[in-house]
Amino acid sequence: MGTTRTRAAHLGPELRRPLVLDAALPLFARDGYAAVSMQAIADAAGVSKPVVYSCFASKEELFEALLLREEAKLWAWVERALPAAGTVAEPEGLLRDGLATLLRAVQADPDALRVIYLQRAGERRIERGRHHWEQRLTEVIAARTPVPAREAAVLGRTLVAMAELGFRVELEEPGAWAPDELAAYLARLVMRGVSAPA
């Protein structure tokens, strides 16, 4: 253990930050923001508390950096799911493929989603983030499908709502649905209704 500490001491804050964030992610995901201390993060990272403070001035700053990293990772998954610019996609396929990509991301890294949806007291970050995602997806749908702007706005909000529903199903009932299967069901439900055949 002493050898690990000695090696760790040679890393400066820039190199240490990602490792501290990696250690903090499962703690926040499991215990919630309020319950996690900087000492717990230091212990999980195998460093002293002063080393953690040399990377992040406070738990709030650390958590914010973690959120930015995990949200960027999730958005990269979304971008990969979207049809290329200049292509025209049919709405149900766009919804299905986008949801499938997001749900596969949740299955691969559930802690990231749990942390993104953690909310500190008095914070409206999740609402702001949801509004941003709705706007961004509305722009993509309007640009890459034949759907008129008014309907694209509703479809963008629907995609975010369906993604959040799918996230909850994946996190609360792991293994009950394969991501692609759940995505196809949710897209079909939105576009065709409950009685639509599979």
Image (spheres, rainbow, N blue to C red):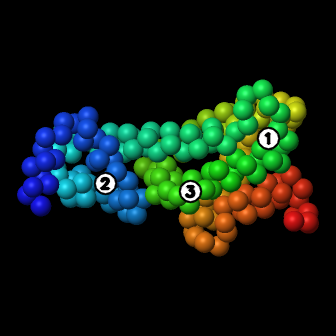
Determine whether label 1 and label 2 are within 8 Å by CB.
no
The image shows residue 40 at horizontal and vertical percentages of 24, 58
Number of callouts: 3
- Please name the amino acid that badge 3 sits on: Val
Comes first in the chain, label 3 or label 1: 3
For numbered disc 1, what is the local secondary structure? helix
What residue is disc 1 on? 154
For numbered disc 2, what is the local secondary structure? helix
Mark 1 vs mark 2: in front:
2
Tell me where residue 15 sits by quadrant: top left
For the residues labelled 1 and 2, the Cα–Cα distance comes to 39 Å
In the figure, 51 relative to 110: above or below? above
What residue is disc 2 on? 23
Tell me where residue 186 sits by quadrant: bottom right
- Please name the amino acid that badge 2 sits on: Ala
What residue is disc 3 on? 106
Residue drawn at (73%, 49%) of the image: 97
Determine whether label 3 and label 2 are within 8 Å by CB.
no
Tell me where residue 145 sits by quadrant: top right
- Please name the amino acid that badge 1 sits on: Val
